Image (cartoon, rainbow, N blue to C red):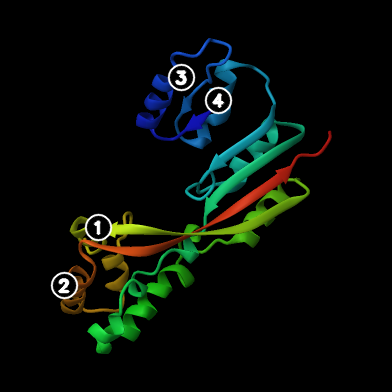
Amino acid sequence: MHVKNSNRAKILKDMAAHLSKIDRPVILCGPLSKLQEQIKEHVSSIRYNAICGRNVLSAESDKTAVVKTIADHIAPGGRIALSENLFFLAQRLYKLFDLKQEKMDLFNRVVEAEEAIYQKSANQDLVWNEDDLQSLFLRGGFRPVTVERHTQKYHRHISKKDIDTWFAPGTDAQPTYSYYLSKTLESEEITSLHGIFLKSLSKKNVIWTSNQALVFVKAGDK
């Protein structure tokens, strides 16, 4: 089992501590770029009948290398199942309330600025889609590759902290909602918008939508 976060690794190890040695999973922690080396530290050669994961690829800059690591460790005929966030379909904040009624003069420009985050971004992680995922595994030599879109709608409580985080200044390395809006809106307009979000959404429950791509792959028999 592999996780990127050391706190999660500790929690998993604590949960598994009572299991017998043969049932206890090996927890590996660190960047996926180091996974090959970490596996070899435990066993020189191993292949798995099944590999599953959540958001394995979405935050990785070299997705092809990760797929190669998977290919190197999946057994012939093995199954792969991944769930990957589709950020280009992320919840649009302007849709959480009637912004058009609150700020008619800003509405169209906010919509344009927010849609540009996902449609015109240089960050490929924000624009990749199901076709990109399928192509990635096909290029890696896997067939067949099935990708399905799964949409979830759930109630989310919006706090003042959430809104303040969205409207924090941000940087190139850690962009925020406000940072993206600043490409087309003046600072005074963003400040006004921040106030409207606080008034309309703070301490409110909303219907939040998220989308994932479910990837199902079968390794070859050789």
Quick one: 208 or 3, which is closer to the camera? 208
The image position of residue 199, as x and y in percent, is: 17, 71
Q: Secondary structure at mark 3?
A: helix
- Please give the name of the residue rendered at 30% of the width and 65% of the height, measured from the top-left corner: 177
Q: Sequence-wise, which precedes: disc 2 or disc 1? A: 1
**Secondary structure at numbered mark 1:** helix
| Apparent side of residue 123 relative to residue 128 in the rendered image (left or right) | left
The crowd level at tag 1 (other Cα within 10 Å; few <14, some 14-19, many 20+) is: some
41 vs 157: above or below: above
Query: Would you name the residue on which mark 1 appears?
Result: 162
Q: Amino acid at mark 4?
A: Glu
Sooner in the amino-acid sequence: mark 2 or mark 3: 3
Which of label 4 and label 1 is nearer to you?
Answer: 1
**Residue placed under numbered mark 2 in the picture:** 195
Residue that mark 4 sits on: 37
Residue 1 screen position, x and y as percent: 53, 28
The alpha-carbon separation of the residues under discs 2 and 3 comes to 47 Å
Mark 2 residue crowding within 10 angstroms, few (<14) / some (14–19) / many (20+): some
What amino acid is found at the position of numbered circle 2 in the picture? Gly
Residue at which label 3 appears: 16
Q: Amino acid at mark 1?
A: Asp
Q: Earlier in the sequence, mark 3 or mark 1?
A: 3
**Identity of the amino acid at label 3?**
Ala
Q: Quadrant of residue 52?
A: top right
**Dot 2 lies on which element?**
helix
> Which of pointers 4 and 1 lies earlier in the amino acid sequence?
4
